[in-house]
Amino acid sequence: MSGRARGPEPQTIFDVSAPGRRASSVAQPAGSPAEGLIPPGLRRASPPRLPEVSELDLVRHYTRLSQRNWAIDVGVYPLGSCTMKYNPKVHEDVAGLPGFRNIHPWQPADQVQGALQLLWEMEQYLAELTGMARVTFQPAAGAQGELTGLLIMRAHHTATEGHPRSVVLIPDSAHGTNPASVALGGYKVRQIPSDERGLVDLAALEAALDPSVAGLMLTNPNTLGLFETDIERIAAALHRSGGLLYFDGANFNAILGKVRPGDMGFDIVHMNTHKTFTTPHGGGGPGSGPVAVSARLAQYLPSPVVGYDEAANRWFWDTDRPQSIGRLHGFHGNFGVVVRAYTYLRSLGGEGLVRIAERAVLNANYLRALVREAYPEAHPGTCMHEFVCTAKPLRAKGVRAMDVAKRLIDLGFHPPTVYFPLVVEEAMMVEPTETESRESLDALAAALLQIAGEASSDPELLHEAPVTAPVGRLDEARAARRLHVRWEPGSPWLDE
Amino acid sequence: MDYTPHTEADIEAMLAAAGFTGIEDLFAPIPGSVRLGRDLALPHGMPEAEVLALMEGLARKNRPTGELVCFAGGGAYDHYVPSPVAHLAFRAEFATSYTPYQPELSQGVLGVLFEFQSMICELTGMGVANASLYDGASALVEAINLATGATGRSRIVLSGALNPNYAAVARTNGGARGFSFSTTAAGDGVTGDLGDLAGAACVVVAQPNFFGCLEDLAAIAEATHAAGALLVVVFDPTTAGVLEAPGALGADVVVGEGQGLGVGLLYGGPYLGYFATRPEHVRRVPGRIVGATVDVRGKGGFVLTLQAREQHIRREKATSNVCTNQTLLAIAATVYLSWLGPQGLVELGESCLAGAHQAADLLASVPGCRLAFAAPFFKEFALQVPGDAERVAAGLAERGYLVGPGLGVASAELASHLLVAVTERRTPEQIEGLAKALAEVVA
């Protein structure tokens, strides 16, 4: 990655700005019409201090910045719980078709039948994949999907019991979005410990269940990469106490076509299209977080949902949803992302989706076996699409998981997720995904084993890493202490 | 096709190395009683060329702008997206990367986000901005959450001239947390009497508002602050070359939709929520913030900072549950704003303003039609038409023009009103064409 961009170190676009230079051309009306049309107090005296650059300045600056970034297209990206698999190029061509790209969200249904048909069919496909009845596409990402699910829980309990209940259960290995969503959903968090198997502690779960519990949020496979084998008993216990079971779809890639959340007893499911259905992560978004629910909860879905008039063969927005929780998105959700996910489903088909689950799980188990000796797994047994191991054996040599991660950068790999889940010391959470070849996994394993050796022979090398990246380890404490979060005119981009 | 690289030989060797005899062994932890045990009832996969043809067929069933001349608004606008935006923002190094949790490998994304935050501060007149949120509506939700946290109050006053979808999203989210909402009148097309603001956490107004009209922000700010509440302004950033920054008029939180900044229409998403506020509220800001720092060798670089606010550290005590944001669209907006420059931003605003006023003059002179409101407006205005607005819009669509939405979406009383928006892309000839078509439709 480093060394490709020649020339001075890129700083900010503001630093290459020169007064009077420009890249844009905008059609101009005669005169300055704002004079009489805008009340004087609302008129801006001098424009915002945006950079002034030529088009070539612009192209070079952002091209160079892009070269200071890792990406799936650059190399292996085994970031646990993120499913960084290959993003097919054809998806971008499809999403760029004028018929998808240039339609306005307020256009009446008769002008956007193709878009509505796509959403309707996608809903049928996701319902089949999850074993659920209906789907909303409004949530813009997984966390908004979680909140949607929690609001549906509230609506269900309020309708059936007159109040929403007050507590949501979460395993101690859960993603941080789960408890944060619970709080925003107006519930209190009650944490359920994992047992020695790395699975939900059934006895603790039973003990935590009471009439205040609205539901349990669960990732299955869980964040340790393990399948919750007691899932039927978990579901039965929840349902006996009137609670609902929520499926966090972060790890859905592992089980596509093998087992469906609905058949395990889940009532509400969110999916991350940017994980399971390989829409590009875009440096941290956009995503899309469709939520699927069982038939008894369908009435609460955000409004509107897509409707289909079979007699007229016509799709429409169904706004007649008196029990809906309301609206979550300004329009219809991240449609352009759903277009890519739909394209992926149609490319793979049912048989292809099963194959990705099989190969994702194969890759994870293979890699785990290759590195096991140096990095013991947190829990024994077969893992699903990812595994959690520990760098704890290296600690005696003064080497930590973070050092392993940073050294991997020098050896040409993006590090796995480290220090998560919180329940494992010196955790390294590795998700190779199904699109990595045996050769890349062998190379990654060799690098990890080399680092374990270096921990004994040359631990300083690990502490100093990375040395080949555009920057070395950054002082995060200073960033928080001397908060510098914007460029300002006349000051250097980084104050000294 | 499935994009996996495994040969049969690979699979056999890998299974053996991992201690399995067959693929099905890998799924042994899943109890048989819950296994699907049948093929998925989904269509079969197909080669890329066939998928592309299928998708082209679906796309052809829509009527995009280009086929229709777009005068539609209501929170999404047909602004021009210059060529460098897609070429740069959608470079694979940006598009196929993830959240910059390893800053040494993410200086590209982090660097652009630092610039994005800086530009949002410039446009809004605020001191601190985050690295983006889902969309304008979700940014409003987060602004309300900040205001309730900062004031310890839970009553929210929404302008009656706010986008009805934004108001709906605010209520959906706030309801679960026990917030109460009230809505002001907006009979003249602008926010009416704010009423008794005692105990209000915030007042929310849009600039320009849903009807395209301009609000007297300074006066609203004064009344809001007198009651100890915060002023939240939903601001259209494409107007920032011409309109005074809300921060200079007393706004405490400025949020909005960055769709007009190089994103495109995309049938409503993915769009780009932005969030800016005064520096004293920085620890209440939701989502990611990029900060500048130095590395071990003293070289400058960027990191995600103040992460103790965020869900992956703070869990249920986080400022927000947001994780994924809209980085790629923030990159597009940053490239767009750099392309535009200060002079371009002024010209963009003036072009929209002039076009909208030309259109308003022509359309209001069509017999039976008139401007709904007397208040100053920017790039969009409400037109009262004879009869049902949706039927008039349908007639215009038959003649190749897209307008709307009809204001029945905001209030049943406004069912004979249409929004008409004019961006810098609309030519005087197109505006005259729309007026002629309207005259035919209402004749």
Image (cartoon, rainbow, N blue to C red):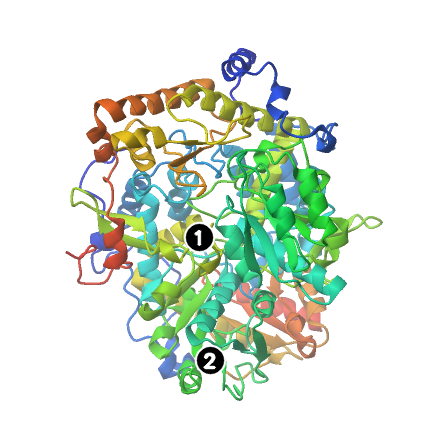
Q: Is residue A112 above or below residue B4?
A: below
Q: Amino acid at mark 1?
A: Val
Q: Residue A282's mark?
A: none
A417 relative position to A398: left or right: right
Badge 2: few (under 14), some or many (20 or more) residues near its Cα, within 10 Å?
many
A456 relative position to A232: left or right: left
Q: Which residue is mark 1?
A: B81
Task: Residue B238: give x, y in percent of width and height.
Answer: 42, 64
Q: Residue at x 67, y 66 (%)?
A: B393
* Disc 2 from disc 1: Cα separation: 28 Å
The quadrant the C terminus of chain A occupies is bottom left
Badge 1: few (under 14), some or many (20 or more) residues near its Cα, within 10 Å?
some
Task: Residue B426: give x, y in percent of width and height.
Answer: 49, 62
Q: Amino acid at mark 2?
A: Glu
Place residue A459 in its image quadrant: top left
**Chain for mark 1?**
B
Q: Nearer the viewer, residue B127 or B208?
A: B127
Q: Are marks 2 and 1 on the same chain?
A: yes
Q: Residue at x 66, y 75 (%)?
A: B411
Q: Is residue B204 visible?
A: yes
Q: Nearer the viewer, residue B435 or A41?
A: A41
Q: Which sits earlier in the primary sequence, circle 2 or circle 1?
A: 1
Q: Residue B215's mark?
A: 2
Q: Tag 1, which secondary structure?
A: loop
Query: Which of the two marks, 2 or 1, is nearer to us in this view?
Result: 2
Q: Is residue B42 visible?
A: no
Q: Tag 2, which secondary structure?
A: loop
Q: Residue at x 33, y 75 (%)?
A: A44
Label 2 with label 1: CB-CB less than 8 Å: no
Place residue B350 in its image quadrant: bottom left
